[in-house]
């Protein structure tokens, strides 16, 4: 089964979505999971910030979310998120198919393994290459403006960056957001394939105009149709069997 993590309203993608209330050893996830079919594929959707957008980025129950998705049978995760652009050519409205991330967060729960058994999973190539290639091809075929690679820097939030921070981040990353970490770390530990689709909503504050939440929401709404079309096109093409290394990330990670 394929899990999709995104904003509230993504359940509209599904035919006859059924809400599932899940409890986990890490508490409740952000909200009910919505299970249903999408173009012949079984899919489970989870609104990252809750059904009323009540969880700020640093308070999202990430461990519960990923545990719940794995518990109901998901093996692949597609994570859709809004980001600011740190580079001129990552224009608002572009979808970046992420291949790397930088963690600049401080206070979150990053792992399922707090001891006494110690694990050090590899994060060298954290995003699923099989899904990245498939979404790149789908964007190309649909004529959707996109970048086939992108480095995402994750900041703590909920505030936006200062101009000085934004200028610094530009030296190392292409886009900036507040939710990819520890979501992807936990997906790696659950041996889930993870694909990050970053929807560029604005130029961060390195540009002349400071980031504005109204502008972010406007661009998100304008580009929602592209995201829906992309998911409906790419998801049916995913092979039943996973071919990459994601399914074995913990195999030799234990000390």
Image: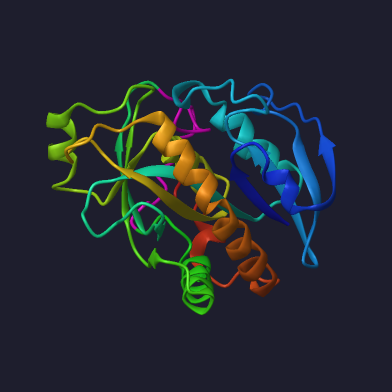
Please tell me which residue lies in front, 36 or 191.
36
Q: Which residue is drawn at 74% across and 38% down?
A: 33
Residue at x 80%, y 47% (from the top left corner) = 35
Q: Which of 166 and 103 is in front in this view?
A: 166
Say which residue appears at 26% left-offset and 52% top-offset: 174
Residue at the spot 75% in from the left edge and 26% down from the top edge: 23
How many numbered markers are drawn? 0
Verify whether residue 109 appears in magenta.
yes
Residue 173 locus on image (x, y percent) = 23, 49
| Residue 142 x, y percent position in the rendering | 53, 74
- Residue 25 x, y percent position in the rendering: 68, 25
Task: Please name whichever residue, 120 or 97, is drawn nearer the observer in this view of the structure.
Answer: 97
**Which of 5/120 is in front?**
5
Q: Give the quadrant of the N terminus.
A: bottom right
State which quarter of the image contains the C terminus: top left
Q: Measured along the vertical axis of the image, is residue 39 above or below residue 225?
A: below
Q: Is residue 157 magenta?
A: no
**Image height of 197 relative to 112, above or below:** below
Magenta stretch, main secondary structure class: loop
Q: Residue 116: x, y in percent?
A: 48, 27
Q: Is residue 67 visible?
A: yes
Tell me where residue 40 sits by quadrant.
bottom right
Position of 154 with respect to 236 (left or right) is left
User: Is residue 156 depicted above or below 153 in this figure?
Assistant: above
Q: Judge whether residue 252 can be spotted in this image.
A: no
Magenta-colored span: 108-124
């Amino acid at each position: 089964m394929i899990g999709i993590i995104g904003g509230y309203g993504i359940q509209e993608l599904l035919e006859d979505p059924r809400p599932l209330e899940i409890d986990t050893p890490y508490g409740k996830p952000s909200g009910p999971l919505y299970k249903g079919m999408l173009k012949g594929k079984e899919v489970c959707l989870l609104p990252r910030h809750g059904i009323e957008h009540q969880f700020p980025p640093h308070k999202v129950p990430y461990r519960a979310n990923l545990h719940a998705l794995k518990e109901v049978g998901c093996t692949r995760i597609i994570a859709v998120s809004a980001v600011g652009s740190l580079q001129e050519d990552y224009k608002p409205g572009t979808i970046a198919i992420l291949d790397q991330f930088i963690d600049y967060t401080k206070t979150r729960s990053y792992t399922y393994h707090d001891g006494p058994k110690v694990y050090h999973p590899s994060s060298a190539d954290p995003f699923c290459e099989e899904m990245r290639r498939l979404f790149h091809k789908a964007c190309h075929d649909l004529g959707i403006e996109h970048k086939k690679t992108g480095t995402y820097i994750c900041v703590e939030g909920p505030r936006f960056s200062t101009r000085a921070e934004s200028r610094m981040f530009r030296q190392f990353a292409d886009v900036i957001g507040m939710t990819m970490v520890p979501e992807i770390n936990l997906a790696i530990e659950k041996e889930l394939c993870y694909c990050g689709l970053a929807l560029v909503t604005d130029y961060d504050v390195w540009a002349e105009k400071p980031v504005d939440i109204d502008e972010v929401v406007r661009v998100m709404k304008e580009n929602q149709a592209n995201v829906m079309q992309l998911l409906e096109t790419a998801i049916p093409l995913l092979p039943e069997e996973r071919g990459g290394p994601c399914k074995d990330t913990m195999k030799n990670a234990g000390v």
